[in-house]
Image: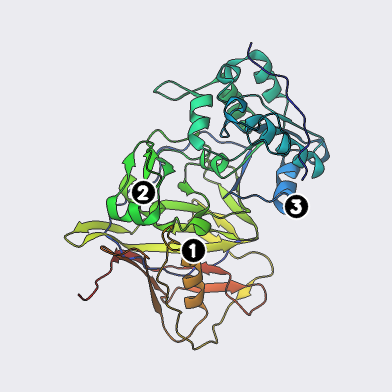
């Protein structure tokens, strides 16, 4: 068999309310949510939007707690990384960046954070056959939790799914069984994205996606909005997933993809922050946010997309932004503020600052991360106006995101000084921005 010896090198090293945002661009019709729900699962998911820091005790601790605490045994999968054969620094433990050394890095972190044991599961592009190997399957069946590292989510498809029908390898089937038996499945970046159901995003930028729309496939042009119709592993099917959302300004691309593919909900994950999902795939599916940033939830049940001579636009979307401790009940579409948060009452009278780069464009050398969220929070923090408009950095065409505070808008805060959790029950609109020539 092709299984290598698992190297154990140690690397050094609540629910709340959200603002209503109106985004301006031209829409495509949004319809129902992702297919039929899978069978009931007593296990849980911990999905991180990327850039999970080594000192994030809250998230690592939550994964370990759900895997059994002091008895936790974590299986680390890093097949989204390049294999050792493609890493010129594979033999240098201080510089390597491949599936095996990344697996050792995460195994070390989990043990440092208190897991009884953590080990790399040796499946990657160099060892695809291991996904159907008896010893590897036995290894998977012996652990109480799984962690999928970042990289390229399509490598997970290549290594753990089989054929055009994307049937499960024996390893993936074993992970599903363990999830059904109560195990926790966690992941960061690509490792969170692969949890998606149908229409998993494969790449793209917000502006190009809004301008050109989405297409099935995996494209050489990294700005082109692509998706995989068959999806990922389908651990979370109640909404479309995106990662690194605010840091990379991906709100626009995931809204366009959702509208194009008929999804009525989006979970837009942020960096170093987890969306914790209990009872995934059941009528009692509930979520909790843990971490320093948040999770945006876009509700597209009433949204309408259309294409006109001016371009693509989306109207009547709803936006909520949940932060640490906030909860969300998927079946009820209901967020709840976390413990210790209280209703925020705006006292400021300043207008919302001008935002000419709402999706943090790659072409803007002065761009600022979390731009979309900043405008939403600024609107929540002022009594001066009930709407705010932010535009894309790119022009010809230029798109505008229009955010609105309606009568059902609410915000929550832990200290009363700044709005953190935002909940909007009014439309969000993306539309082409009219510029006087």
Q: Position of residue 274 (x, y in %)?
A: 62, 51
Which mark, by number, is residue 257? 2
Q: Is residue 367 above or below residue 259?
A: below
The residue where tag 3 is placed is 57
Q: Earlier in the sequence, mark 3 or mark 1?
A: 3
Q: CA distance from mark 2 to mark 3?
A: 33 Å
Residue 114 shows up from this direction: no
Verify CB contact (< 8 Å) between mark 1 and mark 2: no
Q: Residue at x 38, y 38 (%)?
A: 220
Q: Residue at x 57, y 24 (%)?
A: 173
Q: Residue at x 36, y 36 (%)?
A: 217
Q: Earlier in the sequence, mark 1 or mark 2?
A: 2
Q: Quadrant of residue 177?
A: top right
Q: Earlier in the sequence, mark 2 or mark 3?
A: 3
Q: Quadrant of residue 88?
A: top right
Q: Position of residue 358 (x, y in %)?
A: 42, 66
Give neighbour class at mark 2: few <14, some 14-19, many 20+ (Cα, 10 Å): many
The residue where tag 1 is placed is 320
Give neighbour class at mark 1: few <14, some 14-19, many 20+ (Cα, 10 Å): many
Which mark, by number, is residue 133? none
For the residue pair 197 and 39, the one nearer the viewer reads as 197
Q: Position of residue 384 (x, y in %)?
A: 44, 87
For the residue pair 26 and 346, the one nearer the viewer reads as 26
Q: Is residue 24 above or below residue 278?
A: below
State the quadrant of the N terminus: top right
């Amino acid at each position: 068999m092709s299984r290598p010896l698992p190297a154990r090198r140690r690397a050094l090293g609540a629910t709340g309310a959200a603002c209503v945002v109106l985004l301006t661009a031209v829409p495509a019709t949004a319809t129902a949510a992702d297919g039929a729900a899978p069978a009931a699962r007593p296990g849980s998911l911990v999905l991180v939007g990327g850039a999970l820091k080594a000192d994030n005790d809250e998230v690592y601790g939550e994964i370990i707690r759900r895997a059994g605490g002091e008895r936790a045994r974590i299986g680390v999968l890093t097949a989204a990384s390049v294999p050792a054969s493609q890493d010129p620094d594979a033999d240098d433990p201080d510089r390597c960046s491949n599936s095996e050394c990344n697996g050792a890095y995460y195994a070390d972190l989990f043990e440092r954070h208190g897991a009884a044991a953590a080990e790399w599961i040796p499946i990657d592009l160099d060892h695809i056959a291991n996904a159907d190997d008896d010893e590897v399957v036995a290894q998977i069946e012996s652990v109480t939790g799984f962690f999928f590292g970042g990289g390229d989510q399509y490598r997970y498809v290549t290594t753990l799914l089989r054929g055009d029908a994307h049937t499960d390898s024996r390893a993936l089937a074993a992970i599903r069984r363990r999830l059904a038996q109560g195990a926790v499945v966690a992941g960061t970046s690509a490792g969170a994205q692969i949890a998606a159901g149908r229409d998993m995003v494969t790449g793209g930028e917000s502006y190009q996606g809004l301008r050109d729309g989405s297409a099935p496939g995996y494209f050489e042009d990294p700005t082109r909005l692509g998706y995989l119709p068959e999806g990922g592993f389908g651990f979370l099917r109640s909404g479309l997933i995106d990662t690194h959302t605010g840091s990379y300004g991906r709100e626009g691309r995931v809204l366009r993809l959702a509208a194009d593919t008929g999804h009525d909900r989006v979970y837009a994950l942020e960096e170093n922050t987890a969306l914790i999902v209990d009872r995934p795939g059941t009528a009692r599916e509930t979520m909790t946010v843990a971490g320093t940033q948040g999770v945006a939830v876009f509700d597209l049940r009433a949204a309408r997309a259309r294409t006109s001579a001016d371009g693509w636009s989306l109207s009547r979307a709803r936006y909520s932004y949940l932060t640490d401790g906030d909860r969300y009940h998927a079946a009820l579409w209901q967020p709840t503020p976390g413990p210790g948060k209280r209703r925020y009452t705006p006292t400021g009278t300043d207008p919302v600052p001008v935002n000419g780069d709402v999706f943090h464009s790659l072409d803007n050398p002065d761009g600022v991360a979390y731009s979309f969220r900043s405008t939403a929070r600024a609107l929540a923090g002022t009594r001066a106006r009930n709407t705010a408009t932010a535009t894309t950095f790119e022009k010809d065409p230029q798109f505008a995101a229009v955010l609105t505070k309606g009568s059902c808008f609410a915000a929550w805060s832990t200290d009363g000084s700044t709005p953190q959790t935002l909940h909007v029950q009014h439309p969000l609109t993306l539309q082409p921005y009219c510029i006087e020539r």
